[in-house]
Image (spheres, rainbow, N blue to C red):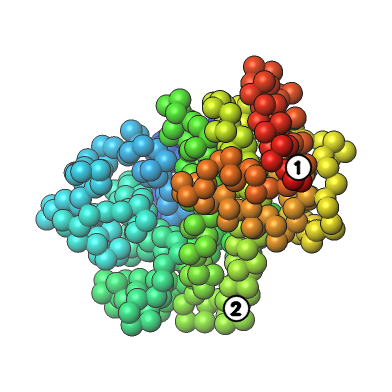
Amino acid sequence: MPIDTIHRMNHWFGHAFKGLSVHVPPARVQKLAMLVHQCMEAKTRTYHTAFHVLGLCESMQPIQILAALFHDVVFYQADGGIPTCVSALLEDVTRPELGFLRLLEIAPDDQAIALCVDIFGFHPGQRLSPRHGMNEFLSAVVAARLLQAHLSHLQLMAVVACIELTIPFRAPDAKGNSAAQRLAQRVQARCTSTALVKTTITNAVDIANRDVTGFIEAAPEYCLINSMLLVEESMMPRTVSGERSLLAYRKALLAMDIFLSQLNPAWVGQSYENHPTAEAVIQMQVTARQNIAFVRDYLTAVLSTVAIIEALTRSTGTVWTMALFLDSMRCAEGDQFPAPPNEPILHADLRQLLKHGLAPEGNPGLDALPLTACVYGFLGQVATQQVRQQAQQMFDGLLKPLAFLQMLDYDMVSAIICKMAKIDMSRQEQLLTLERKLHAVSMPV
């Protein structure tokens, strides 16, 4: 409920200010809570929501809580621009220019944005990119401008530093310095206390690691839920504008798979001066590697099934709505699907998730995809990966949809066609005609 969410945000703002011995009038606290809530609950968001932010606040220190509350208030690509509720705070910070944002010159007396520019290592005139901290920077500017009347300079710097380190998945620089080490150098330029620098960076490490806990701590299925929420979120601007399509869904899945294929597990978690310990860092990397592999196996299975359905629709000259597509993904019943020609090697947990989904209490869940479970169960792990590679050739235009279908097991494809024909009677004739064509090709000469 929105009221409950706003109440919880109000609680965390109040808790943080109290922990810092800062008096902020209750009306002001409520206004901050409502502003953050308004940003986070945009209808274009599915992952970067109030649910995510509130989960970061638990068991955190006051500075970390304030950073957590603000760190995602701007999510440019999902929101389709700067959220209206914070646009007045950012109108003099950037200007749009040929599809991106350019950082403007800093007014001499604007200490809040000067602080953010220094801590992020940005400079006026710089082109800002969502992949390189644009959202986090703009969120930090919002935080700095709203909190500067209540916090000391060092407290405000610590909040901004925490937000900076939530820029995820950064490689070491040419000198081997991690994102945390580079941040420490920039903080040190504004703070002469070595102890305070260390406290600031270790606090930032904690919030940054909490932000990616789905990769480095959680079980694989929760990493998968987060990944699919991000896939959904990447499609939401088109969904809201009525442009949601099968092609957009497939492209979103492919984009996530490509991203994960390039993600080095060593870049997921953060550490600074043995915090967390070397052993904990190794475990984070091991967990990240396992979770990434599991999510990619799931995406491989789903994309293989998506490819089959796409090939069927393209081969029959039909156009399916997203609703019909999702219905086809969920329609399978195991006892109506052909038995595999051999005993395929499967990832049992993956098949269970595909077959039954996951609905954890009080958390976002994962829909069951029984058709994908049947296809995966029929093919097995190795053959599913082979189909995914063949599907990529079709996606790239190197393989015609009919040729792709002819490379697959006829009995499996025939079963899928029969199920699709039952879902959409208006396309039954075209589908069954295609089934007869595939059958003729599959017959021995």
* Point 28% across, 58% down: residue: 116
* Point 60% across, 68% down: residue: 289
* Point 68% across, 21% down: residue: 428
Q: Nearer the viewer, residue 29 or 84?
A: 84
Amino acid type of the residue tagged 1 in the rendering? Met
Amino acid type of the residue tagged 2 in the rendering? Ile
Asked if 17 appears above or below 201 in the picture, the reply is above
Which label lies toward us, 1 or 2? 1
Q: Which residue is mark 2?
A: 282
Q: Which residue is mark 1?
A: 443
Packing grade of label 1 (10 A; few <14, some 14-19, many >=20) is few
Mark 1, secondary structure of its residue: loop
Q: On the image, which quarter does residue 425 sit in?
A: top right
Q: On the image, which quarter does residue 192 sit in?
A: bottom left
- Whether the residues at callouts 1 and 2 have beta carbons within 8 Å, the answer is no
- Which residue appears farthest toward the right when viewing the image? 335
Q: Is residue 406 visible?
A: yes
Asked if 444 appears above or below 127 in the picture, the reply is above
Number of disc labels: 2
- In the image: residue 433, left or right of residue 47: right
Q: Nearer the viewer, residue 421 or 444?
A: 444
